[in-house]
Image (spheres, helix red, strand yellow):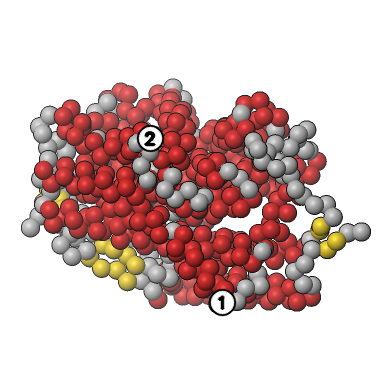
Amino acid sequence: MKWTQVIDPLNNITLSVLIAAMPIIFIFWALIIKKMKGYQASLIAIAIATVIAILVYGMPVKLAVLSIAHGSLYGLFPICWLVIMSVFLFNLTVKSGQFEIIKHFMASITSDRRLQALLIAFSFGSFLEGTAGFGAPVAITAAMLVGLGFNPLYASGICLIANTAPVAFGSIGIPITVASQVSGIPEMPISQMVGRTLPILSIILPFYLVTIIAGFKKAKEVLPAVLVSGVSFALLQYLSSNFLGPSLPDVIAGLGSIVCLMVFLRFWKPKTIWRFANEPAPTLNTDITYTGGQIVRAWSPFIVLTIMVIAWGMQPIKDALNSLGLFQFEVPGLHNVIQDKDGALLPKIFKFNYLSAAGTAILIADLVAIPMIGLTYSDGAKVFAATLNQLKFPILTIAAVLGFAYIVNDSGITLTLAEVLANTGYLFPFFAPVLGWLGVFITGSDTSANALFSKLQYATATSIGVDPVVTVAANVSGGVVGKMISPQSIAVAAAAGDLVGQESQLFRFTVKHSFIMLIVICFITLAQAYAVKWIIPVYEMINSKKLVAAPDASRGYIYLIVLAVLLVTLASTILVIARRKKQTPTLVN
């Protein structure tokens, strides 16, 4: 049995849109007005979307149930798998006492909360987004800021907002790769176009973040550091995206901005150290010092994490790992059963890439780090059990959110909303980022949003005489500002920031900033389409007949051997340092 999606089920596009928007309006209402817990809002939204899918869109009950189950399964793996391992890594550093040394190190650079937020939420988070993505940056950086003493709501909120700048190039450029595959436009021009939009946001974002934290006047006090952070990031993001491609902008810009800001802070300090209201004064004890070896040991879990996520992002290693550990299956009763409006059957395949998943890379980092930071594997098992207990409600929330995303996509509800935006004619470039924003809000992923709407962006732009690379890139750029309010992202940030059950507070904290940034990107896209056409790169469409070489896993095996040697060397060095000098602070007379 085949079932075909419909875009206008009521034969009146206005009424169809009003009905289609009800589940999304409910989420906003539930989180902003009713202040519901995240998992409650998500489960009710699923029920509303299912009723609409079945009664209005005519989706068979069996398909609706299978679609929700498919989405929930994806929520558990790879999303929850990654979140659990990320929080587990942070909890290990706390349990071992190493995070106290990290806190001391960060305070020695600066104990100013404004600058700590720039270093960790903005720069380090961007680096993690470029390597791992899919929730890991927010999970790790929010946990780190809370550990440093940040207010949990501010820690989670600013990490979500800071995550906007790098999302387009996340996971070694996967969102742009998918946009290219779906639209037929080569990766490089999309990367260039996105790289000529987001650096504007990247320059503004650090000052915007500090203003959110401390207010406009206090933000001006650290304007030199803010400019160093934002301009260095934006410049490196622009150069790498325009001349190297979509794979490395986040890695290069994230690391570059960390180095630039740390060097700058050696020569410049703010006149006053800013802390949160009612927060104790900085407690850096200058009588306590740590050796370089002790500091490296404390940071070693994150050093190993960095090595692992970079390695797992390399295509040869992915190919090698998938050749050894990839189990995939067609979802029974759902695969090739739903037809889109053009009659194409939608494949529904679940890929259980248990070796190449980013969560597995972080798990290996966890296991390598346990002895390096002075814990036993028995201690690690206890910390892991505590982490699972800590995340039980976020796991439920994430599974529910992905179930919701899949039912609204498979039923055609999302396509109804997209159709209205596509019919805005001359103004479509202004609304093109809204499509990406909507897609990321629903799915939680810029990659998924690009898979969903890139073809529509291409076709609509072509029909109104606008270069399609502008609107396809706008889908990518618009999606980044939807990430901060996606229920999936909110659930991840709440879990990391110890705000379980308070997702509504986090949503209300970020939602206005999402709309402000979206409007900015809408105007930039409109200008690119009509006023500053010279900014559009020259390119040729992908030749669909071009042969694609089969993946060669052998090179990946060599990389894995090199990686193993690197990890063993690093772990041995750290353990030798630990044996030479016990992990105790040195008192200076």
| Residue 186 in the image, given as x and y percentages of width and height | 40, 47
Q: Quadrant of residue 337?
A: bottom left
Q: Is residue 553 left or right of residue 183?
A: right
Q: Are marks 2 and 1 in contact (CB under 8 Å)?
A: no
Q: Secondary structure at mark 2?
A: helix
Q: Is residue 405 left or right of residue 307?
A: left
Where the N terminus falls, by quadrant? bottom left
- Tag of residue 459: none
The residue sitting at the left extreme is 1
Q: Identify the residue at horizontal 22%, vertical 63% (top origin).
A: 331
Q: Which residue is mark 2?
A: 32
Q: Identify the residue at horizontal 43%, vertical 70% (top origin).
A: 355
Q: Identify the residue at horizontal 83%, vertical 63% (top origin).
A: 586
Q: Is residue 519 above or below residue 556?
A: above
Q: Secondary structure at mark 1?
A: helix
* Amino acid type of the residue tagged 1 in the rendering: Tyr
Q: Earlier in the sequence, mark 2 or mark 1?
A: 2
Query: Is residue 10 in sight in this rendering?
Result: yes
Where the C terminus falls, by quadrant? bottom right
Query: Is residue 181 in sight in this rendering?
Result: no
Q: Is residue 366 left or right of residue 458?
A: right
Which is nearer the eye, 121 or 99? 99
Which is nearer the eye, 357 or 578? 578
Q: Which residue is mark 1?
A: 377
Q: Identify the residue at horizontal 43%, vertical 35% (top origin).
A: 508
Which class describes the residues within 10 Å of circle 2: few (<14), some (14-19), or many (20+)?
some
| Residue 253 in the image, given as x and y percentages of width and height | 60, 46
Which class describes the residues within 10 Å of circle 1: few (<14), some (14-19), or many (20+)?
few
| Residue 484 in the image, given as x and y percentages of width and height | 45, 41
| Residue 363 in the image, given as x and y percentages of width and height | 50, 68
